[in-house]
Image (cartoon, rainbow, N blue to C red):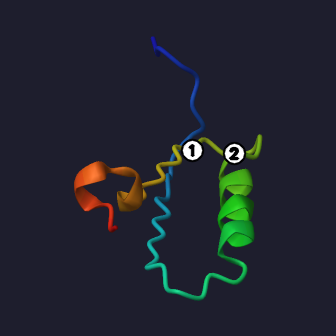
Amino acid sequence: MSIVETPEPPYYPVIFTSVRTETSDGYDETALKMVRQAESPDTTSLVLLYNPANIPEHATA
């Protein structure tokens, strides 16, 4: 018995990291496309977005 119905294996992790620079042309659009793709109906996914600027002890003045 399973708690949830999941697709059959194999499972593939996809991990993306990036470092923001002063030039961020296209960054927001690309990030949005990646999130939308991960949320598509044919995927089982977990999307975790981490921005240290949103955490007070990491924010710069």
At 47% from the left and 14% from the top, the residue drawn is 3
User: In this rendering, is residue 12 above or below 3?
Assistant: below
User: In this rendering, is residue 5 above or below 49?
Assistant: above
Quadrant where the C terminus sits is: bottom left
**22 horizontally vs 36: left or right:** left
At 77% from the left and 40% from the top, the residue drawn is 41
- Identify which residue, 14 or 59, lies in the foreground: 59
Quadrant where the N terminus sits is: top left
Percent position of residue 60, x then y: 32, 68
Can you identify the residue that label 1 sits on? 45
> First in sequence: mark 2 or mark 1?
2
- At label 2, the amino acid type is Glu
Percent position of residue 6, x then y: 57, 31
Write down the quadrant of residue 51 in the picture.
Answer: bottom left
Label 2 to label 1: alpha-carbon separation:
7 Å
- Identify which residue, 45 or 52, lies in the foreground: 52
- Badge 1 local density, few (<14 within 10 Å), some, or many (20+)? some
Q: Do the residues under discs 2 and 1 have CB atoms within 8 angstroms?
A: yes
Mark seen at residue 39: 2
Percent position of residue 57, x then y: 22, 54
At 58% from the left and 23% from the top, the residue drawn is 5
Percent position of residue 36, x then y: 74, 52
Q: Give the residue furthest to the left.
A: 57
**44 horizontally vs 26: left or right:** left
**Helix, strand or loop under label 1:** loop
**Helix, strand or loop under label 2:** loop
User: In this rendering, is residue 13 above or below 24?
Assistant: above
- Badge 2 local density, few (<14 within 10 Å), some, or many (20+)? some
User: In this rendering, is residue 54 above or below 31?
Assistant: above
- Identify which residue, 40 or 25, lies in the foreground: 25
